[in-house]
Amino acid sequence: MCGATEGGLALAGVDVTKEAVIQGRVLRGGTPVPNAYVRLLDSGGEFTAEVPTSATGHFRFFAGDGNWTLRTLAPGAKADRAVVAARGSVAEIDVDLDAA
């Protein structure tokens, strides 16, 4: 086992038993979108964090347990996706901007 989720970011060095991980990638028509911004909003819609996507469209957050919203912003597109984070698990989500 290589420590990576299928198709996702490697988890080497991440103790998922102590972390609630939200990760995934941003796509447009199946193609990764680099330099998009993904915001993490809490259950009340308040801004918590923001990261740019990598060259492969990937992003990762370490969050508390609970319900979150991922707000993805890229030129000409905005998408919100609900996600549930729980310590000890990895919430893997792909955001397809064409489906927004």
Image: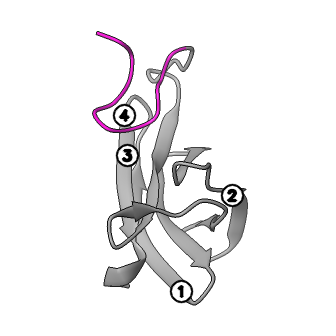
User: CA–CA distance between discs 4 and 2?
Assistant: 22 Å
Q: Residues within 10 Å of mark 3 (few under 14, many from 20)?
A: some
Amino acid tagged 3: Ala
Q: Earlier in the sequence, mark 3 or mark 2?
A: 2
Left or right: 94, with 15 as reference point: left
Which residue is the site of mark 3?
Answer: 91
Q: Earlier in the sequence, mark 1 or mark 2?
A: 2
Numbered disc 3: secondary structure: strand
On residue 30, which mark appears? none
Which residue is the site of mark 4?
Answer: 89
| Dominant secondary structure (helix, strand or loop) of the stretch shown in magenta | loop
Residue 48 in percent (x, y) is at 71, 62
Amino acid tagged 2: Pro
Which residue is the site of mark 2?
Answer: 52
* Quadrant location of the C terminus in the rendered image: bottom left
Q: Earlier in the sequence, mark 4 or mark 2?
A: 2
Q: Are marks 4 and 2 in contact (CB under 8 Å)?
A: no
User: CA–CA distance between discs 3 and 1?
Assistant: 23 Å
User: From where the camera sits, is residue 44 visible?
Assistant: no
Query: What stretch of residues is rendered in magenta?
Result: 1-12
Which residue is the site of mark 1?
Answer: 77
Q: Residues within 10 Å of mark 2 (few under 14, many from 20)?
A: some
